[in-house]
Image: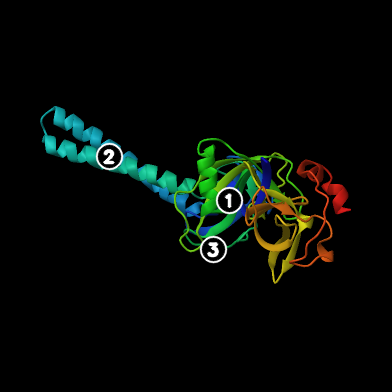
Amino acid sequence: MDTIITKDYVCQIQSIRHIELRALEKGYLQKISVDEGQTVKEGQPMFKIMPNVYQAELQKAEAEADVAEIEFKNTKLLADKNVVSPNELAMSKANFEKANAEVTMAKTHLGFTEIKAPFDGIMDHLHVREGSLLDEGELLTTLSDNSKMWVYFNVPEAEYLDYITDGHKDDRTEVSLLMANNKEFNHKGIVETIEGEFNNETGNIAFRATFPNPEKILRHGETGSILMKIPLMNALIIPQKTTFEVLDKKFVFVLDKNNVIQQREIFISAELPHLFVLEKGLSENDKVLLEGIRLVKEGEQIAYDFLEPEKVMSSLDLYAE
């Protein structure tokens, strides 16, 4: 029969944007305007490095630019009267442009002393405190955009090939997320991308599903399990209660044409409530013992009542009781 199974894959949950905020200039940390775990808005001031030195450098650069501008204008007047050569005018102009570039550079360095949120997000714990002497590039905190979450899970090569060849190459498969508390997340995700290479050590390839996170329940670094529904066409299915184990192997009792019990090893490819999906070991024409497994031995000839598979499948909850 055709059926659907649900496969679960261990996953890692990551923010759609997760970045480190670092100091771009050396100096003393003058002010922290945010707190750990706080939600911040794009452009909101977060950290301020003491700007005195950089303000002084800007004032110096602006003064030098003013001097260069006066020199350039004077030189241009003289050049117009052929008092100085065109080369001297070009040199004066170059000095003026260099001075303006120094002003732009000084403004940039001064701007680096105030660190603002690059996007809406939630900040992590602080790595520094007010008054700390910062080095260039020192980590201040991290910022996560949790409006959507990227959930990564690894799929074995054989299951990847089944997924692709079953026509899922270009569609957006819907998946569910089982959180660490064993509860299902209340929004569905969509498989949007598959990585380009297999991991040679594990034989897996990474899938990425995107989940909306409007209530901000999910956080960067969480774990869970992805639940993906896989359709099975023309699958061979038997009730779980027909099976028994011997040394970690699964067996069923099969009746031959003489009604003699034969023990047969089976191989399971998937599990459903009260059912096993078989990989191999039986054919659809085999008769399998449903009741009385503990009352018979291999090689015994028995009398039996035949039950239609449809009737058995519809009564499995009752049988399970």
The reply to whether the C-beta atoms of the residues labelled 1 and 3 are less than 8 Å apart is no
Amino acid marked by disc 1: Tyr
Q: Is residue 49 visible?
A: no
- Measured from the top left, where is residue 145 in percent x and y? 61, 44
Looking at the rendered structure, which numbered label has been put on residue 27?
none
* Marks 2 and 1, the one that precedes in the sequence: 2
Q: Nearer the viewer, residue 316 or 133?
A: 316
Question: Residue 204 location, x and y as percent?
Answer: 52, 56
**Residue 230, position in %: x, y?**
63, 44
Quarter the N terminus occupies: top right
- In the picture, the disc for residue 96 is 2
Give the mark nearer the N terminus: 1 vs 3: 3
Nearer the observer, 141 or 89? 141
Image position of 283 with respect to 81: above or below? below
Residue 289 in the figure: left or right of residue 42: right
Badge 2 density bin: few <14, some 14–19, many ≥20, Cα 10 Å: many
Residue 98 in view of the camera: yes
Q: Residue furthest front?
A: 258
Residue 263 figure quarter: bottom right
Query: In the rendered image, which residue does mark 1 sit on?
Result: 152
Residue 276, given in percent of the width and then of the height, sits at 71, 53
Q: Which mark is residue 133?
A: 3
Q: Eyeballing the image, is 131 above or below 215? A: below
Distance (Cα) linking label 1 and label 3: 38 Å
- In the image, 314 versus 174, the foreground residue is 314
Say whether residue 185 is left or right of residue 202.
right
Dot in front, 2 or 3: 3
Label 3: which secondary element = strand
| Residue found at x 51% / y 51% | 51
Point out the residue furthest to the top here.
80
